[in-house]
């Protein structure tokens, strides 16, 4: 047997162990961070480890690692496991191409381009559009900002930023916006955080007011980052109204759909993106709502010339054959780039666009199960809104930070907390489309049982108002 065949049969054995463990104990046995190196032997030594010990160590590591695919993991904006996507990712690892040239990636180039083309069609971007697969949603925001900067002042590519550029996003947007402002040379002090309404959506009137003020003060409005699915509440900024403003003042509009941009695939929920075709760029993470393995992030650009202008560089040692349309390195931030497209393609191909729609709509169905449960139970206070898969609540006025940490430390369920304006709450994310109604009800059940057994959990009510 070749080494790879042997190792793949070991892989299969380990998969068996993991799957079994996931159903037996959906929350991994937690190792206190301070005891990690004493609990598992992670040391790297001079001599090799013998096979049997190696296997047993790997299986220990597997069962101790947080289990993100189970029905009690609600902590993050990803979860579950779409097996056809896992299959594609495993094949991508075996093939080990790099996506920069057709010479090295062959048909994988077409696979990536087909996803981008179909996504552009869904957005309504037209024939001049294209895109790429960045390393994630943060990088998508970054690439959009670089294009916006270069579009506003082409000389900034050569001379750096010399104009007083100003950029805009909502107070509820992703934190990568702040870092990106610094990386791109515009500076953190030149972001304006626009106030959100009571639903967590950017207020367009406030945006316009701020733009006018900046222009009066000699600033150059360059970029607006609107969010489709804010990280805490899952709110959708009003794209159409924001586009009225960015068109009027000639500002690049990027839609950060990392979390919920995949509503693109649902006729029922696509209206949440109304006006998206008017944006200059749009990004979404297939590893969030669509459930592919991390990472699978896509940025689409209405006019592909911006991608080339900002990201291509001549490199004779690399681009030796085939045209620009097949040498994807010309539109990428990276040089070597892993194949993030194949896993999305195997999923999409095997279940169709209709299947992707079902994955998206299932999450809203599960969110409604949670919403109804909370609304019908007076021990709960609700903080989130309709059309969101982030269900935010408090239970019996228990401090949510204390509750979430206790649930995690006792290996009950993994869920996080968030804040909006003056409130802090538990945030249940129903993004795992493998879950069913009973899994959501079970979440509330284990939470309530845990609280009943731990009456000492502190209460927020007592803090002075
Ligand atoms: C998750 C998220 C991001 C960041 O995406 P990464 O792939 O984790 O870098 C950006 N914006 C929003 C709204 C997100 O929810």
Image: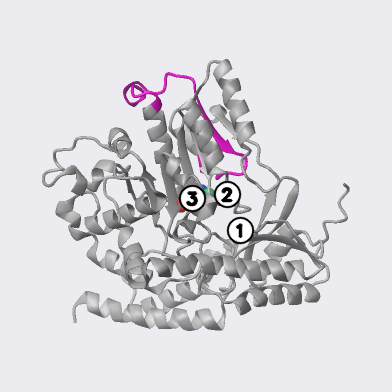
User: Gap between marks 3 and 2, in whole Å?
Assistant: 9 Å
Magenta run includes residue 233: no
Magenta segment range? Answer: 152-177
Placement of the N terminus among the 4 image quadrants: bottom left
Mark 3 vs mark 1: give the one in front: 1
Left or right placement of residue 279 versus residue 446 in this view: left
Instruction: Kindly tell me whether mark 3's CB lies below 8 Å from ligand 1.
Output: yes
Counting residues from the N terminus, which is met first, the one under dot 3 or under dot 1?
3
**Taking 329 as reference, is 68 above or below it?**
below
Left or right placement of residue 144 versus residue 423 in this view: left
Q: Are marks 3 and 1 in contact (CB under 8 Å)?
A: no
User: Gap between marks 2 and 1, in whole Å?
Assistant: 9 Å
Instruction: Examine the image and state in which quarter residue 318 appears.
Output: top left
Q: Where is residue 411 in the image (x, y as percent from the top left)?
A: 63, 72
Mark 3 vs mark 2: give the one in front: 2
Counting residues from the N terminus, which is met first, the one under dot 2 or under dot 1?
2
**What residue is pinned by disc 2?**
236
Q: Which of 39 and 62 is in front in this view?
A: 62
Residue at the left extreme, as displayed: 321
Q: How crowded is mark 3: few (under 14 residues within 10 Å), some or many (20 or more)?
A: many
Q: Residue at x 24, y 54 (%)?
A: 98
Give the SS element for disc 2.
loop
**Taking 21 as reference, is 417 above or below it?**
above
**What residue is pinned by disc 1?**
387
Q: Which of 1 and 37 is in front in this view?
A: 1
Q: Which of 249 and 27 is in front in this view?
A: 249
Q: Are marks 2 and 1 in contact (CB under 8 Å)?
A: yes
Q: Residues within 10 Å of mark 1 (few under 14, many from 20)?
A: some
**Taking 113 as reference, is 275 above or below it?**
above
Magenta run includes residue 157: yes
Q: In the rendered structure, find residue 257 and report the number of the disc placed on it.
A: 3
Q: Which residue is drawn at 35% across and 81% down?
A: 12
């Amino acid at each position: 047997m070749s080494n790879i065949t042997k190792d793949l049969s070991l892989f299969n054995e380990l998969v068996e162990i993991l799957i079994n463990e996931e159903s037996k104990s959906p929350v991994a046995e937690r190792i206190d961070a301070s005891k990690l190196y004493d609990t598992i032997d992670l040391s790297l030594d001079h001599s090799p480890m013998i096979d049997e010990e190696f296997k047993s160590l790997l299986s220990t590591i597997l069962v101790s690692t947080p289990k993100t695919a189970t029905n009690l993991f609600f902590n993050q904006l990803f979860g579950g496991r779409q097996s056809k996507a896992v299959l594609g990712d495993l094949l991508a690892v075996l093939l080990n191409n790099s996506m920069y040239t057709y010479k090295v990636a062959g048909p994988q180039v077409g696979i990536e381009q087909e996803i981008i083309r179909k996504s552009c069609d869904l957005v309504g971007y037209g024939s001049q559009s294209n895109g790429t697969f960045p390393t994630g949603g943060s990088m998508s925001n970054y690439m959009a900002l670089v294009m916006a900067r270069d579009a506003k002042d082409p000389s900034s590519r050569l001379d750096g930023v010399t104009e007083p550029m100003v950029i805009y996003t909502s107070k509820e947007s992703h934190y990568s916006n702040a870092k990106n402002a610094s990386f791109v040379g515009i500076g953190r002090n030149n972001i304006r955080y626009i106030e959100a309404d009571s639903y967590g959506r950017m207020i367009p009137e406030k945006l316009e007011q701020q733009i006018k003020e900046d222009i009066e003060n000699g600033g150059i409005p360059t970029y607006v980052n609107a969010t489709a699915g804010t990280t805490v509440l899952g709110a959708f900024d009003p794209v159409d109204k924001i586009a009225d403003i960015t068109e009027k003042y000639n500002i690049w509009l990027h839609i950060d759909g990392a979390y919920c941009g995949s509503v693109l695939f649902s006729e029922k929920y696509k209206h949440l993106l109304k006006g998206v075709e008017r944006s200059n760029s749009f990004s979404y993470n297939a590893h969030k709502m669509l459930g592919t393995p991390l990472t699978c992030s896509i940025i689409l650009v209405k006019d592909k010339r911006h991608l080339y202008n900002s990201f291509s560089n001549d490199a004779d040692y690399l681009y030796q054959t085939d045209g620009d349309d097949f040498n994807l390195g010309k539109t990428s931030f990276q040089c070597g780039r892993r194949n993030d497209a194949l896993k999305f393609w195997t999923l999409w191909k095997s279940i169709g666009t209709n299947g992707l729609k079902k994955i998206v709509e299932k999450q809203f169905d599960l969110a409604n199960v949670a919403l109804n449960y909370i609304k019908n139970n007076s021990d709960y206070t609700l903080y989130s809104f309709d059309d969101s898969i982030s269900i935010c609540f408090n239970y019996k006025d228990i401090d949510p930070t204390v509750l979430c940490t206790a649930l995690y430390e006792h290996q009950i369920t993994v869920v996080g907390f968030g804040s909006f304006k003056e409130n802090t709450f538990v945030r249940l994310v129903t993004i795992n489309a493998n879950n069913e109604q009973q899994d959501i009800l079970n979440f509330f059940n284990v939470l309530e049982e845990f609280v009943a057994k731990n009456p000492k959990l502190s209460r927020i009510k007592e803090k002075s108002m």
